[in-house]
Image (cartoon, rainbow, N blue to C red):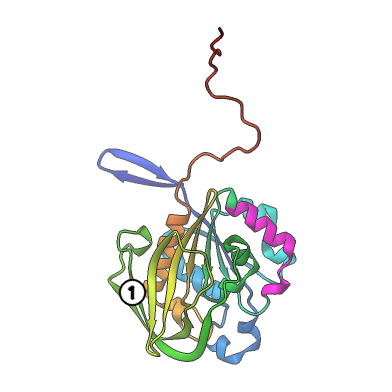
Amino acid sequence: MVKITIGEQSFELKTIKVTLWNEYIAERKNPEVAAVYPNGIHKALADGLKPYGFQIQTATFDQPEHGLTENVLNDTDVLIWWGHEVHEEVEDAVVERVYERVLNGMGLIVLHSGHFSKIFKKLMGTTCALNWRESGDQEILWVVNPAHPITADIGPYINLPEEEMYGEFFDIPEPDELVFIGWFDGGEVFRSGCTFYRRLGKIFYFQPGHETHPTYYHKEILQVIANAVKWAASPHGAAPTFGELKPLINRKKDTL
């Protein structure tokens, strides 16, 4: 809990518990990636998000159960997912565990090539395929929903000098909310920031973050991710029940 005081009133705010999941493979075998993220993408994100006051832990692919044990997930308000090379090697049991936690209220933020992760495809119910090009294009991320809390403290756009191009068609369901559209200097556009609701869980997909570009050191990109964490961890309604339902109102039947 974090205690804040406004005037003569004091309030306690819950500290948001964030788990950062990263394959942590490319950084250890590709010198080009290691030069950008010498301690891993998860460490760069953890350092960048630290000033926002979250309680942060990290997990990686090669840990037992990929670091996503029941205890870890039960102690997680928002899970951030970055993956690229070993999507199909993530254990189905772990995917199912994450899936159930999302349905029951854990927030999920899927970054960049995590669009092809088992968990994102399972939650979307589509292939999540797209077009791409590794050419270091300039990208302008346009805010198309300035009323959305994920855009707090962000201007009308974010300018990234270099990024991997992701282009339409992006095979996802119609987003519940479209927050960002990316434009690349090759002429392509992409639905770069999308939200989805699955039962009690809130999901945000955010496209920037190729491993050979320093995207996760960019102040505004970190601001968006921090905003998304706060949004995904925000309160939700009561858990729904399923099965046979007795009448809420008992009425005597009219008789002749």
Q: Which residues are magenta?
A: 87-102
Q: Is residue 29 left or right of residue 216?
A: right
Q: Is residue 127 left or right of residue 164?
A: right
Q: What is the x, y in percent for residue 19?
A: 57, 61
Q: Nearer the viewer, residue 41 or 158?
A: 158
Quadrant location of residue 60?
Answer: bottom right
Rendered residue at 61%/78% (across/down): 84
Rendering coords of residue 15 (x, y %) = 47, 51
From the top left corner, tell me how far across and down residue 166 is, in percent: 48, 81
Q: Quadrant of residue 152?
A: bottom left
Given the current orientation, which residue lies at the most extreme top position? Answer: 256
Residue 169 screen position, x and y as percent: 49, 77
Q: Residue lying at the far left in this picture: please name it.
A: 7
Front residue of this view, candidates 125 and 107: 125
Residue found 27% across the figure and 38% down from its top: 8
- At label 1, counting other C-alpha atoms closer than 10 Å, the crowd grade (few under 14, some 14-19, many 20 or more) is many
* Number of numbered tags placed on the structure image: 1
Residue 117 found in image quarter: bottom right
> Is residue 4 among the parts visible in the rendering?
yes
Q: Amino acid at mark 1?
A: Trp
Residue 53 vertical placement versus 133 (above, below): above
The residue under label 1 is: 142
Say whether residue 96 is magenta. Answer: yes
In depth, the one of 183 and 138 nearer the eye is 183
Assign the C terminus to one quadrant of the image.
top right
Q: Residue at x 56, y 13 (%)?
A: 253
* Most common secondary structure along the magenta stretch: helix
Q: Measuring 47% from the left and 58% from the top, which residue is drawn there?
A: 54
Q: Give the vertical position of 195 relative to 1 (above or below).
A: below
